[in-house]
């Protein structure tokens, strides 16, 4: 239910912003003069990892409470360079927080597990057309590939003991995406983005899974210079 709400929010944001873009745009940066320009973007959104079961349990005298997250949060930063108005090179790094688990037992033992996947992707964005008279609303398709570094951290704290475990694994993967970029004035760019990550299997589980392929939905804010 929460996933659907967030997806609808991203779509509504995009449609509302596209409707109001003429009043915001000062038409300095637009489709037609992007060639040779650079861009920096910050992306924030959600990563759908519903293949991980969400659990909350409480039991008897020797009780325990376990909570899992079923929605991962993501963030990334990327550099972009336009070879042509319709084609740009893009390289970025980010983090997908895919699995968070905490457990508390009646014996005062507390354990926590966090699994994070960090993609470092290089690819291109293709802008086939503009959909506003001001040339400021740009739909795009994207493809990128690179390493997905999985990091799993587990810590257990007991009455007299503390233990920690860290696993780091790397696989190769790719991302297909699409979205809308909104060019505002001489410097700014906003975006609504969706994509799907395809990745190989880790040799050891990173948290609950060995494969975290799945969709992401994000908003972006950036600069064009």
Image (tube, rainbow, N blue to C red):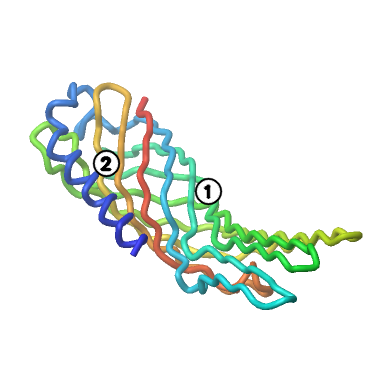
Lateral position of residue 159 relative to residue 61, left or right: right
From the viewer's side, name the closer residue of 56 and 208: 56
Hey, which residue is sitting farthest right in the picture? 160
- Depicted 221 relative to depicted 164: above or below: above
Q: Secondary structure at mark 1?
A: strand
How packed mark 2 is, by other alpha carbons closer than 10 Å (few <14, some 14-19, many 20 or more), is many
Q: Are marks 1 and 2 in contact (CB under 8 Å)?
A: no
The picture places residue 197, in percent across and down from the top left corner, at 44, 63
In 3D space, how far apart are the residues under numbered discs 1 and 2 (Cα atoms)?
A: 19 Å
x 68%, y 73%: residue: 204
Q: Secondary structure at mark 2?
A: strand
* Disc on res. 94: 1
x 20%, y 38%: residue: 17
How packed mark 1 is, by other alpha carbons closer than 10 Å (few <14, some 14-19, many 20 or more), is some
- Considering the image in quadrants, where does the C terminus appear? top left
Lateral position of residue 96 relative to residue 156, left or right: left
Quarter of the figure with residue 187: top left
Which tag, 1 or 2, sits closer to the chain's start?
1
The picture places residue 153, in percent across and down from the top left corner, at 71, 59
x 58%, y 66%: residue: 67
From the viewer's side, name the closer residue of 100 and 172: 100
- Considering the image in quadrants, where does the N terminus appear? bottom left
Lateral position of residue 67 relative to residue 130, left or right: right
Quarter of the figure with residue 102: bottom right
> Which residue was labeled with disc 2?
181
Hey, which residue is sitting farthest front in the picture? 61
From the viewer's side, name the closer residue of 39 and 23: 23
The picture places residue 195, in percent across and down from the top left corner, at 36, 58
x 62%, y 58%: residue: 149
The picture places residue 21, in percent across and down from the top left corner, at 16, 33
């Amino acid at each position: 239910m929460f996933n659907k709400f967030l997806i609808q929010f991203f779509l509504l944001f995009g449609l509302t912003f596209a409707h109001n873009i003429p009043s915001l745009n000062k038409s300095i940066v637009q489709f037609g003069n992007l060639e040779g320009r650079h861009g920096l973007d910050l992306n924030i959104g959600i990563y759908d990892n519903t293949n991980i079961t969400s659990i909350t349990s409480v039991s008897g005298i020797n009780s325990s409470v376990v909570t899992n997250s079923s929605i991962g949060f993501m963030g990334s930063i990327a550099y972009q360079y336009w070879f042509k108005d319709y084609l740009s090179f893009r390289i970025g790094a980010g983090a997908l927080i895919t699995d968070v688990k905490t457990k508390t037992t009646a014996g005062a033992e507390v354990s926590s597990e966090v699994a994070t996947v960090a993609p470092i992707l290089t690819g291109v964005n293709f802008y086939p057309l503009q959909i506003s008279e001001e040339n400021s609303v740009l739909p795009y398709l994207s493809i990128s590939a690179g390493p997905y570094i999985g990091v799993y951290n587990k810590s257990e704290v007991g009455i007299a003991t503390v233990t920690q475990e860290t696993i780091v694994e790397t696989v190769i993967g790719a991302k297909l995406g699409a979205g809308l970029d909104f060019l505002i004035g001489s410097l700014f760019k906003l975006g609504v983005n969706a994509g799907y990550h395809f990745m190989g299997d880790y040799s050891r589980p990173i948290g609950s899974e060995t494969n975290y392929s799945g969709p992401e939905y994000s908003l972006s804010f950036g600069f064009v210079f």
